[in-house]
Image (cartoon, grey):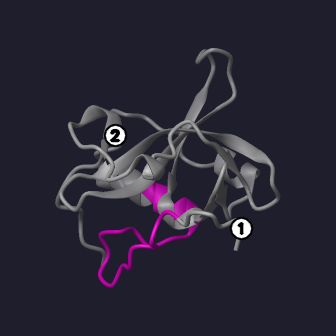
Amino acid sequence: MTQERSTPLVRLADTHLTLASDLDDIRGRDVVDRNGDEVGEVEDLVIDPGERRVRMLEVGSGGFLGIGEKKQLIPVDAVTGVNDVVHIETAREHVASGPEYDPDIVQEPEYAASVYDHYGYPPFWSPGYIYPGFPFYGAGPR
């Protein structure tokens, strides 16, 4: 049985918190899948303010000047490396078929659970969860 989260997730941009180092800030970097295909761009980091950990990447794709853009959340567990771009182990098509990001429902436990379920990872609030050590600087895909 999975426990529920105790603190809500928030976008880093919506808090007073900052990253320990500018090197940790991957916002604005392109995201590429395991095949090297572009998935989108990291627009923000979704964090657990209680534990001060990044839990998901908010990734925008498509559209023009923000019009028609689709946003999705990708668990940090999917990140396999960070250098000039963010590498994820998931194929672009799988990301595109995932739950679309809606800032009004990101607080709902069912929504966050559906994101983790779509990517095949246990949610961070489940017993025994081990933080993936995000990010993996200087590394390419594993």
For the stretch drawn in magenta, the main secondary structure is loop
Q: Spatial distance from mark 2 to mark 1, Cα to Cα?
A: 26 Å
Residue lying at the far bottom of the rendered structure: 128
The residue that mark 1 highlights is: 141
Asked where in the image residue 41 lies, by quadrant, the reply is top right
* Residue drawn at (60%, 31%) of the image: 70
Q: Is residue 18 left or right of residue 100?
A: left
Residue 138: give x, y in percent of width and height. Answer: 62, 64
Residue 52: give x, y in percent of width and height. Answer: 25, 57
* Residue drawn at (69%, 28%) of the image: 62
Residue 37: give x, y in percent of width and height. Answer: 80, 49
Q: Quadrant of the N terminus?
A: bottom left
Asked where in the image residue 45 lies, by quadrant, the reply is top left
Q: Nearer the viewer, mark 2 or mark 1?
A: 1
Q: Amino acid at mark 1?
A: Pro
Which is more N-terminal, label 1 or label 2?
Answer: 2
* Residue drawn at (37%, 34%) of the image: 103
The residue that mark 2 highlights is: 11
Dot 2 falls on a residue whose secondary structure is strand
Specify few, some or many for label 2: CA neighbours under 10 Å numbering under 14, 14-19, or 20 or more. some
Q: Is residue 123 left or right of residue 30?
A: left
**Span of residues in magenta:** 114-135
- Give whichever of 110, 121 is nearer the camera: 121
Q: Is residue 116 left or right of residue 8?
A: right
Residue 121 to residue 52: above or below = below
Residue 23 to residue 123: above or below = above
- Give whichever of 90, 86 is nearer the camera: 86
